[in-house]
Image (cartoon, rainbow, N blue to C red):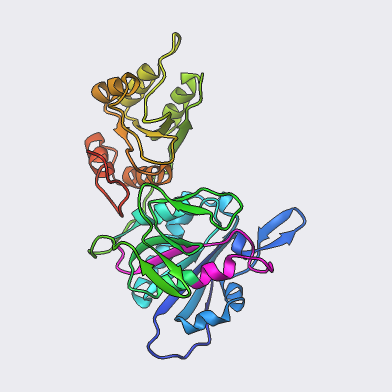
Amino acid sequence: MESCRTDISSVGKKRILLVGTGGTIASEMGENGLEPELTSRQLLRYVPDISGICEIDCIQLFSLDSTNIRPEHWLCIAGAIQECYEQYDGFVVSHGTDTMAYTAAGLSYLIQNSCKPIVLTGAQKPIGYETTDSKQNLRDAFTVAASDLFGVMLVFNGKIIMGTRARKTHSKSFEAFSSINYPVIGVVQDGRIIRYIRPDGKRATRFYDILDSKVALLKLVPGIDCGVLAYLLEHSSAVIIESFGVGGLPVYETGSFYETIKRGLEAGKIAVLTTQVENEGSDLSVYHVGSSIKKNLPILEAYDMTTEAVIAKMMWILGQTSEREKVAELFYTPIACDILSAF
């Protein structure tokens, strides 16, 4: 882990820690395409004007394409922030965009009720490119990190998004992320924050350091064999099922999703039903294919949560307990505005 201190002697500015993890923002072209090469210190050299916003220290935890980021890396980032939490007023995590929403959700559960801003950002184009969104995203991220906002947030293309509500919705354009089923906290325009909402009041910050990463995701497609679900239940602690529409499980002449889930639940596994539809969430009570499950099986329903948040939250919950009633209680307890319409 590389650490450094920028040559800033200004008095009265907030101290922000930049945590480097790799991603497109730090990439350079190699023989086989873009690869993360630049450190957090090198990123700052491209945006020297950020020194006018705050004092900055840097650490480099790893240099990874975010495709290779795993839950153990979330724990590493959370641990680094916890280690120096009292020394800084805010934190910026530079990260690849492809799994940034998962990391933002993961950090939202590993660092709960943060009284300081923890801001994830990145870019769709490397910082060394002539046309890049990297520099402005970094400026905006440091502006938010030096503000009086708090909690885990994702800042991208001027938008400030709750860490539990972010999703990458565009693969190439600078407008990469959206806030799902929840308004954006605000926007950054010309170095100023325009706030739309104020998250819940500050409470005692709590850090966690355990996750159970054996959480699987099954996206239903027409005609899928329920044997796939049986396999995932056997090899995972929990399975999240992305169903169609407001939610439900298919009823086939051969094979039974209902019976497959029932056996998995009897074996102590956890099942969560959510929807593939991006907006408005699930409602198992609407159709027979959903209501019969909701009435007869202790399956959890994700409602308006994002799939990224459901996965991260379940990993966090199972790191605390495997008792079914406690799992359900924690799952339906709102954390960082992750669920609003459960009942």
Q: Position of residue 109 (x, y in %)?
A: 34, 53
Q: Is residue 1 visible?
A: no
Figure check: 5 above or below 137:
below
**As rendered, which of 214 and 158 lies closer to the eye?**
158
Residue drawn where x is 51% and y is 21% of the image: 222
Report whether 114 appears left or right of 50.
left
What is the quadrant of residue 254 in the picture? top left
Residue drawn where x is 64% and y is 63% of the image: 126
**As rendered, which of 124 and 270 lies closer to the eye?**
124
Q: Residue furthest right?
A: 31
Report whether 325 appears left or right of 122.
left
Please tell me how many numbered marks the rendered image carries: 0
Residue drawn where x is 36% and y is 54% of the image: 183
Quarter of the image where the C terminus is located:
top left
**Magenta run includes residue 260:** no
Q: Position of residue 36 (x, y in %)?
A: 64, 61
Residue drawn where x is 33% and y is 63% of the image: 196
Figure check: 259 above or below 94:
above
**As rendered, which of 106 and 221 lies closer to the eye?**
221
What is the quadrant of residue 216 in the picture? top left
Magenta stretch bounds: 114-139
What is the quadrant of residue 207 in the picture? bottom left
Figure check: 262 above or below 301:
above
Report whether 8 appears left or right of 272.
right
**As rendered, which of 153 and 56 lies closer to the eye?**
153
Q: Position of residue 115 (x, y in %)?
A: 29, 68
Q: Position of residue 150 (x, y in %)?
A: 33, 66
